[in-house]
Amino acid sequence: MFFQGSPQNQARLINQYQDLVDIPLLMAIDAEWGVGMRFKDQVISFPRQLMLGAIQDDNLLYEMGKEVAFQCKKIGIHVNFAPVADVNNNPDNPVINDRSFGEDMYNVAAKSFAYMKGMQDNGILACAKHFPGHGDTGVDSHFDLPVINHSLERLDSLELMPFKVLSEQGIASMMVAHLHTPAFDNRKNRPTTLSENVIKNVLRKQLNFNGLVFTDAMEMKGVLKHFPAGIAEAEALLAGNDMIVLPTELDNAFTTIKTYIKEGKISQSQVEESVKRVLAAKYNLGLHKGHNSL
């Protein structure tokens, strides 16, 4: 996963990394408004999603997704952590705000779908975030754990709506947010990223989602303020995430995850299911045929 640099340098690095491994790596970028969000020089930065939410012709969002996919593929990237499918219904939201398509859930769903389809029709996996909905928070999960005290009925009818649409329309992956949502999991300070009910029940069963599930960045205080590094990553896998994003202490995480598996907290069958989903995504991208970037 890359956050900065130039497209040429990152393409060279990706090629070097891919040459070192037997099983191709899945490369991701957090490029909500295009690769210009992260890279400098010779790349396009599109408007932020709030501005795009005012567009009347959703076909323009499809074309944007198509161009973002083209640029990602040229660099060697396979997954874009976009669209932001949060309904931004809190004007004081310090972290989502103009990253969302707006406060109308129908518009958010339609715009997210068009952007997603533009990317996925052109060979890049889209990732809807931040499940189950980060729009009505007054706290930035980079620095603390936001609490969403809405009822199940409210969450189901509003926050979850765009994610339901995207799941039905075949989005390839979703990213789970660091939120405390008592209606889903009332354990004290339990982030949604570490909640089996949120991922295995709400996302997998209720939304019938079969794609990849990523955590939000595990370096964020929304999780680390309440769970130490190592335990946090193991709990995230136990909860049902397939891939852990930006763990802070790799050795500690590996050791703790192995302990969870050895003790039977994380079953072998769950590990195999996640591995199969990751390998299937790589196969569907054609990575078994070799990598190709700049």
Image: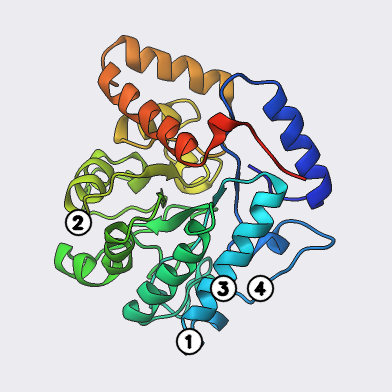
Image point 26% across, 20% down: which residue?
A: 269
Tell me if 262 is positioned left or right of 88 in this view: left
| Type of the residue with mark 4 | Phe
Q: Mark 4 and mark 3: span between their CA atoms?
A: 11 Å
Mark number, residue 57: 1
Inspect this view and state whether residue 84 appears. no
| Type of the residue with mark 3 | Glu
Q: Of callouts 1 and 3, which one flags the residue occurring earlier in the amino acid sequence?
A: 1
Name the secondary structure under disc 1. Answer: loop
| Label 4 sits on residue | 46
Name the secondary structure under disc 4. Answer: loop
The outermost residue toward the front is: 289
Q: Of callouts 4 and 1, which one flags the residue occurring earlier in the amino acid sequence?
A: 4
Q: Of callouts 4 and 2, which one flags the residue occurring earlier in the amino acid sequence?
A: 4
Label 4: few (<14), some (14–19) or many (≥20) C-alpha neighbours in 10 Å: some
**Closer to the camera: disc 3 or disc 2?**
3
| Type of the residue with mark 1 | Asp
